[in-house]
Image (cartoon, grey):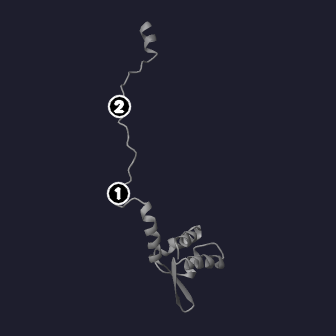
């Protein structure tokens, strides 16, 4: 699968949420369906898109289908993105700040002081 197909699959918020659910490990389809308020066929379609993009793999155990992340495919995405990201050892540089001159404190004059002296 190409990066474009992976990006398209990840372009939907529901599919990204499924990916986040699967980062903890394998889940049966029923557990994934429970996390959404959509109808089962809608979630099933999202799972199919992720599977077609190669981002998830399935394992059948009787009538149950279990989904897991395909970390190799996520690795391909990571490899493609890595030239655009700073190296882990490098910290992003912040803008250089100008040294601020120490402000000269001018004592504020209380306007009522001059009235006090007149009395």
Quarter placement of the C terminus: top left
Q: Position of residue 50 (x, y in %)?
A: 56, 76
Which mark sits nearer the N-terminus, 1 or 2? 1
Q: Are the residues flagged by discs 1 and 2 in contact, CB closer than 8 Å?
A: no
Q: Is residue 88 above or below residue 109?
A: below
Q: Position of residue 76 (x, y in %)?
A: 45, 72
Q: Secondary structure at mark 1?
A: loop
Q: Secondary structure at mark 2?
A: loop
Q: Which residue is mark 2?
A: 101
Q: Is residue 72 above or below residue 59?
A: above
Left of 72 or right of it: where is 90? left
Nearest to the observer: residue 74 or residue 34:
74
Q: Residue at x 58, y 67 (%)?
A: 11
Q: Residue at x 47, y 70 (%)?
A: 77
Instruction: Say if residue 119 shows up in the picture.
Output: no
Nearest to the observer: residue 63 or residue 91:
91
Q: Residue at x 35, y 57 (%)?
A: 90
Instruction: Say if residue 96 shows up in the picture.
Output: yes
Q: Which residue is mark 1?
A: 90
Residue 40 position by quadrant? bottom right
Left of 7 or right of it: where is 103? left
Q: Position of residue 36 (x, y in %)?
A: 60, 73
Q: CA distance from mark 1 to mark 2?
A: 30 Å
Q: Residue at x 44, y 77 (%)?
A: 72
């Amino acid at each position: 699968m190409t990066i474009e197909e992976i990006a398209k699959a990840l372009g939907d918020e529901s599919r990204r949420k499924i990916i986040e659910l699967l980062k903890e490990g394998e889940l049966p389809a029923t557990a994934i369906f429970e996390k959404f308020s959509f109808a089962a066929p809608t979630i099933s379609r999202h799972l199919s898109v992720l599977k077609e993009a190669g981002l998830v793999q399935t394992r059948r155990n009787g009538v149950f289908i279990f989904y897991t992340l395909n970390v190799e495919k996520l690795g391909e995405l990571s490899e493609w993105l890595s030239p655009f990201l700073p190296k882990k050892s490098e910290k992003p540089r912040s803008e250089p700040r100008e040294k601020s001159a120490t402000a000269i404190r001018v004592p504020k004059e209380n306007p009522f002081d001059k009235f006090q002296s007149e009395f």
